[in-house]
Image: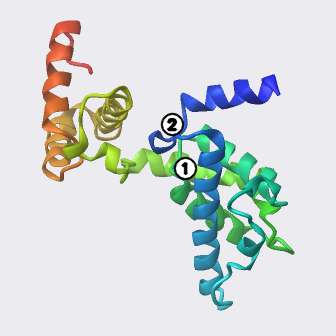
Amino acid sequence: MAKKCCDELALMAVKWFDYRILTPDQATMECLYHYALATRHFQKEAGNGSYFNFLVRVDLSNPKEWGGWKFIEKIRQHADSLGMPYKLYWDFAYIARSRIPFQRSYISIFLNKRLQTMVAELTAKHAENCLILSDHRLFRPESYTGCWIQKLYFNYVVRAAWERFGKANFQRMLGQILEDGKIPLDFLIEWRISKRLTTATTNI
């Protein structure tokens, strides 16, 4: 039990920002929701219609009694270790699933090591080219109050913009992110003041 607690504490520092305000079980339910949506989309694309049958076995008042709970919990932990939003994780998981000739479609196949390695590779490649942003209302500029998790998230946005677009394009991309309403002006002002006080270099 202690090991599991420590694992969850370690994941808290790397998991996607939307879920750091949730308990592990709440995050697992969020992951299950996105699994259901991704499964429905996959089944429709395969010509099988909607595929929500497995959800009838989930008692929402006691979801941990569902036979697939341990599987979805472990999958959620893998997504957390990659720092991924669950929707994006399941997009990549089904891409990987389509490339591996599984005989069956049980949830347990998503714990396949080859599949999980492929998901991690897709994640790394995506992160090299795209800036992953949150749609959570807590991280909308108009919701900014300066609380710790908002500052963590917007610091991530600034750092990720620097890493992906480099020094030459950083200011332009930061201006575009601001114009697109993805980062609050108040935070940028605080961030610039903080950087002027803490470093004399041109690196952030």
For the residue carrying disc 2, how many other residues have a C-alpha within 10 Å: few (<14), some (14-19), or many (20+)?
some
Q: Considering the numbered disc 2 on the image, is that residue within a helix, a strand or a loop?
A: loop
Quadrant of the frame with the N terminus = top right
Count of marks, rendered view: 2
Residue at 68% over, 42% down? 77
- Pick the front one: 77 or 132: 77
Disc 2 marks a residue whose amino acid type is Arg
Number of the label disc, if any, that sits on residue 20: 2
Q: Residue at x 33, y 31 (%)?
A: 159
Q: Quadrant of residue 156?
A: top left
Residue at the image position 18 percent from the left and 39 percent from the top: 184
Q: Which residue is mark 1?
A: 123
* Residue 96 showing in the rendered view: yes
**Nearer the observer, disc 2 or disc 1?**
2
Coordinates of residue 120 in the picture (x, y in percent) = 62, 47
Query: Which SS class for mark 1?
Result: helix
Residue 113 x %, y %: 79, 50
- Tell me if I can see residue 112 in this picture: no
Q: Position of residue 150 (x, y in %)?
A: 33, 34
Which quadrant does the C terminus fall into?
Answer: top left
- Label placed on residue 45: none
